[in-house]
Amino acid sequence: NAGVMQNPRHLVRRRGQEARLRCSPMKGHSHVYWYRQLPEEGLKFMVYLQKENIIDESGMPKERFSAEFPKEGPSILRIQQVVRGDSAAYFCASSPMMRETQYFGPGTRLLVL
Amino acid sequence: AQTVTQSQPEMSVQEAETVTLSCTYDTSESNYYLFWYKQPPSRQMILVIRQEAYKQQNATENRFSVNFQKAAKSFSLKISDSQLGDTAMYFCAFDETSGSRLTFGEGTQLTVNP
């Protein structure tokens, strides 16, 4: 049973470009969560999605960041007009239901030059 | 807002010995979940152990066990017979009832020495 998949594992962008991070949950999981880990810090919650619905986006920056989890395909975290402060590791987690244990993917390391 | 505090930024232990990592949290909820995750040098987040707040019995997973003190809002992780592969950053996390977000502590870097 494959775990949570994230791609790309490493992403380099120049300031002003767009970054798209993908997350495929574990088989049978319909709940997806995105977290950000800045250097030398713990993980911070960004957004919680179910298929086609955003349940909780209270941790998302108000501008430039968006997330979706379509009926078909992976969840996408999109960062427009990236800035150097967006450089971080972005982790996706999935669970079969709300309040169930979240299993994490390997993360995407975003570097903004 | 819920907070999770890990007061030990770094710890070290000799191989085969026992070490305890501390975690305290603050919440007004009565039903919640607590977790320990480890992050080895590969940076992958790996679940170590999970505790339901309504269960009085402390969770155990092989060499890993917790000491859950609900009244004191304390959730420490004990690693017995430490192995070199236990070297990692350990994060304590809290799952609030009203949503499904995890709130993480700042982590404790554990080094197991040969």
Image: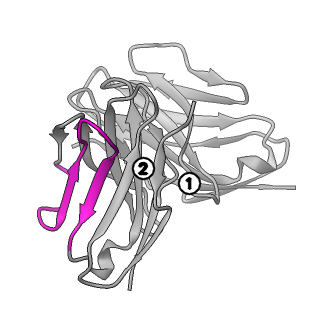
Can the viewer see residue A60 in this picture? no
Q: Quadrant of the N terminus of chain A?
A: top right
Residue at 33 percent of width and 25 percent of height:
A99
Q: Is residue B109 magenta?
A: no
- Predominant secondary structure in magenta? loop
Residue at 35 percent of width and 52 percent of height:
A35
Residue labelled with disc 1: B108
Q: Is residue A73 magenta?
A: yes
Residue range highlighted in magenta:
A58-80
Do marks 2 and 1 share a subunit? yes
Q: Amino acid at mark 2?
A: Gly
Residue at 46 percent of width and 61 percent of height:
A8
Q: Circle 2 marks a residue in which chain?
A: B
Closer to the camera in the image, A84 or B33: A84
Closer to the camera in the image, B71 or B14: B14
Q: Residue B83's x, y, as percent?
A: 80, 44
| Image height of B22 relative to A111, above or below | above
Closer to the camera in the image, B2 or A54: A54
Location of residue A73 (image quadrant): top left
Q: Amino acid at mark 1?
A: Thr
Apparent side of residue B49 relative to residue A22 in the rendered image (left or right): right
